[in-house]
Amino acid sequence: MNTTTDRRPSNGTAYAIIGLLVAVMLLAAGGYLFLSGSQPAGLSVGGPFSLIDGDRKPVTDQTWHGKYLLVYFGYTFCPDVCPTTLNNVADALDKLGPKADRLQPLFITVDPKRDTPAVVKQYAAAFGSRIVGLTGTPEQIAAAAKAYRVYYAEHRTGPGPDDYSMDHSSVLYLMGPDGRFIAPVRADQNGPEMAASLAKLMS
Ligand code: NI
């Protein structure tokens, strides 16, 4: 019986194809990371923005000039990624020590239709006193998201006006006190991991 020897070449071929597929997927993922701003040098991320804070006051990127910014785009109806991320940010700030006083986390909604100033204010406050929630007109949000290379899109879940969720990219952006982009910070880190990442990136 030579079934085993007969099968070996086809198994080898199958493994080769799987290996090739994995390589292609890794390349695609690498390309995506590159395009989405994980390459600090040469790619501009961030820049001027005009938004509205929880008290309906206009704010810009200059409002916190001199502080590090930790910028995150999401929306308050987000079922899990946004609240998990903001919990981790709040936890990271608690663990960051004195450096936390030089860091301002901003939560910018990609759902200005539902996330009014009052809604983002109350939502951000649920994660402690440090995170500031921002909203704006759809045009202001679009401009800010474009500057930060953030993707977002409405995803219909039913016929009603509020029957939708928002697809959105989930990356934290660390900006320096001079307003310049320093690095992306992974949003799926737990509090201690995120605190360690931030401590390394802040001088
Ligand atoms: Ni979300």
Image (cartoon, helix red, strand yellow):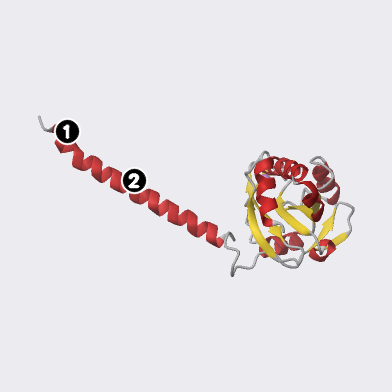
Is the C terminus in the top left, top right, bottom left or bottom right quadrant?
bottom right
Question: Which image quadrant: the N terminus?
Answer: top left
Identify the residue at the far top of this view: 1
Q: Residues within 10 Å of mark 1 (few under 14, many from 20)?
A: few
Q: Position of residue 200 (x, y in %)?
A: 66, 53
Q: Residue at x 71, y 57 (%)?
A: 202
In this rendering, would 12 be left or right of 115? left
Depth check: give the residue in front, 142 or 24. 24
Dots 1, 2 in contact, CB < 8 A: no
Q: Residue furthest left?
A: 1
Q: Earlier in the sequence, mark 1 or mark 2?
A: 1
In the visual, does 5 lie left or right of 165? left
Residue 63 got which mark?
Answer: none
The local secondary structure at tag 2 comes to helix
In the displayed structure, 178 sits above or below 184; it is below
- From the top left corner, tell me how far across and down residue 192 is, in percent: 68, 41
Q: Which residue does the image show at 30% across and 48% down from the upper left? A: 17
Q: Quadrant of ligand 1?
A: top right
Residue 116 visible to an observer of this rendering:
yes
Residue 180 is situated, as x and y percent measured from the top left of the image, at 71, 66
Q: Which residue sits at x=63%, y=48%?
A: 155
Of residues 102 and 203, the one nearer the viewer is: 203
Q: Which residue is mark 1?
A: 4
Residue closer to the observer: 93 or 63: 93
Amino acid carrying mark 2 in the image:
Ile
Residue placed under numbered mark 2 in the picture: 18
Cα distance between the residues tagged 1 and 2: 20 Å
Residue 159 in view of the camera:
no
Q: What amino acid type should be assigned to the residue bearing mark 1? A: Thr
